[in-house]
């Protein structure tokens, strides 16, 4: 148990004098058992030094106590400041949000957005009017009129090109190249007849494939192809035109090639009809060579069969089965291609959503870390 200290003055002159940083004890007796026991461990000058160390330790403890009180007071002030700032920040944010909504309301004639859309925009347009001498565009007024005229002509030209003869000639050129290659593979002759009139004077029938006579027992057998790249063609009109082309080019079978548009978006890629006629629908910018090859094989076989010819060494029953299986395979390919496009689109969307979610998670973790660090700083 700590003993209680008492101090006794031994004379009238006893006391404690302070001179600057010096303290002088005169004729003073301190009664304290703990202090006496502590100083008994040393003698002479060492005992005096030990007393001085004890006094310095006491002064340090006193300063430490005062500092702790200051820290507590600062922490209290910091908490009050933080709460005040948070409250003020929330109120400012709310007020700002209300202000923004109010000023962005285009139904309010007095809002900032309404004023910008009416007075300011009209004023800017008026000030920039090239016909006014004060306008910065006045000096190039004529050039602007010429540019706008040229731009209008270009837009009109682009719209016209979609329905122009050149638009169709691009498809004709592509199809002629493919048929020339396929005909060479089967020993046939391909002739582009788009601009060549028959003996009747008609030019119906864009390409004629004359089949190798070795397959026809000397009969003149041909397939006629008609190409169209227009927006709207009905199925009945297409069949009527290919029939006319077969008659005009003396062909035993015919294929009508139609560029895919919104009008025929749901038509099957390959459709065959009575009278050895077929319609195929292609992507004009990316013509499916397998589809054209299938139509070439089918039309060629149909033309040969029109004469009742049975070529030695050819199992026509098996050939018909293979052609039918090829058609099924092609239809399946078209479905898979469409499904693949849909799957790829969904996959791209899923990847985009995943990246957005990862980014949002990273932002939330950053906010949490910042909040924790802020709490640690306040607690120090």
Image (cartoon, rainbow, N blue to C red):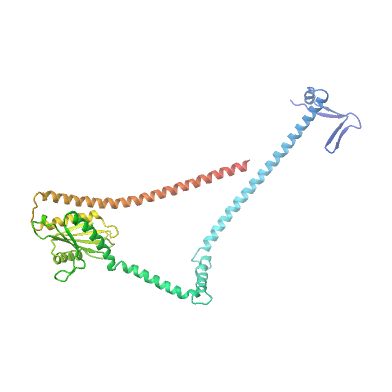
Query: In what quadrant of the picture does the C terminus appear?
Result: top right
- Seen from the viewer's position, the closer of residues 319 and 232 is 319
Residue most extreme to the right: 12
Q: What is the x, y in percent for residue 94?
A: 55, 56
Image quadrant in which you'd find residue 185? bottom left
Identified at 52% across, 60% down, the residue is 101
**On screen, 197 above or below 190?**
below
Identified at 74% across, 34% down, the residue is 60
Image quadrant in which you'd find residue 230? bottom left
Query: In what quadrant of the picture does the N terminus appear?
Result: top right
Identified at 58% across, 55% down, the residue is 91
**On screen, 83 above or below 58?**
below
- Seen from the viewer's position, the closer of residues 121 and 229 is 229
Residue 231 in view in this figure: no
- Seen from the viewer's position, the closer of residues 151 and 378 is 151
Q: Is residue 279 left or right of residue 123?
A: left
- Seen from the viewer's position, the closer of residues 267 and 150 is 150
Q: What is the x, y in percent for residue 309?
A: 8, 55
Q: Is residue 59 left or right of residue 268?
A: right
Q: What is the x, y in percent for residue 20?
A: 84, 39
Identified at 23% across, 55% down, the residue is 291
Q: What is the x, y in percent for residue 297?
A: 17, 54
Residue 35 in view in this figure: yes
């Amino acid at each position: 148990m700590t003993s209680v200290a008492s101090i006794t003055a031994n004379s009238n002159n006893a006391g404690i004098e302070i001179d600057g940083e010096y303290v002088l004890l005169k004729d003073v007796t301190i009664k304290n058992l703990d202090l006496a026991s502590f100083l008994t461990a040393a003698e002479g000058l060492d005992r005096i030094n030990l007393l001085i160390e004890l006094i310095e330790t006491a002064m340090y403890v006193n300063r430490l106590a005062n500092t702790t009180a200051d820290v507590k007071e600062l922490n209290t002030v910091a908490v009050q400041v933080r709460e005040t700032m948070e409250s003020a920040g929330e109120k400012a944010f709310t007020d700002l949000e209300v202000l923004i909504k109010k000023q962005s309301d285009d139904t309010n004639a007095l809002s900032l957005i309404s004023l910008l859309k009416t007075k300011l925009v009209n004023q800017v347009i008026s000030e920039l009017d090239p016909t006014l001498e004060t306008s910065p565009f006045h000096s190039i007024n004529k050039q602007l009129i010429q540019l706008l005229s040229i731009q209008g002509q270009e837009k009109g030209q682009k719209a016209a090109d979609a329905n122009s003869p050149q638009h169709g000639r691009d498809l004709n050129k592509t199809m002629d190249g493919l048929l020339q290659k396929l005909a060479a593979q089967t020993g046939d002759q391909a002739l582009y007849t788009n601009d060549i009139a028959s003996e009747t004077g008609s030019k119906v029938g864009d390409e004629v494939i004359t089949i190798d006579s070795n397959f026809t027992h000397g009969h003149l057998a041909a397939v006629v192809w008609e190409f169209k790249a227009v927006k709207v063609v009905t199925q009945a009109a297409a069949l009527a035109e290919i029939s006319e082309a077969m008659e005009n080019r003396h062909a035993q079978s015919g294929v009508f090639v139609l560029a895919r548009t919104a009008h025929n978006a749901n038509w099957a890629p390959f459709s065959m009809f009575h009278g050895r006629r077929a319609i195929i629908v292609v992507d004009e910018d990316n013509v499916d060579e397998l589809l054209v090859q299938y139509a070439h094989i089918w039309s060629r076989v149909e033309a040969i069969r029109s004469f009742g010819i049975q070529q030695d060494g050819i199992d026509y029953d098996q050939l018909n089965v293979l052609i039918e299986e090829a058609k099924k395979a092609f239809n399946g390919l078209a479905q898979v291609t469409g499904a693949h496009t849909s799957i790829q689109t969904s996959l791209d969307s899923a990847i985009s959503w995943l990246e957005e979610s990862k980014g949002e998670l990273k932002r939330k973790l950053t906010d949490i870390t910042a909040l924790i660090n802020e709490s640690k700083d306040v607690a120090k």
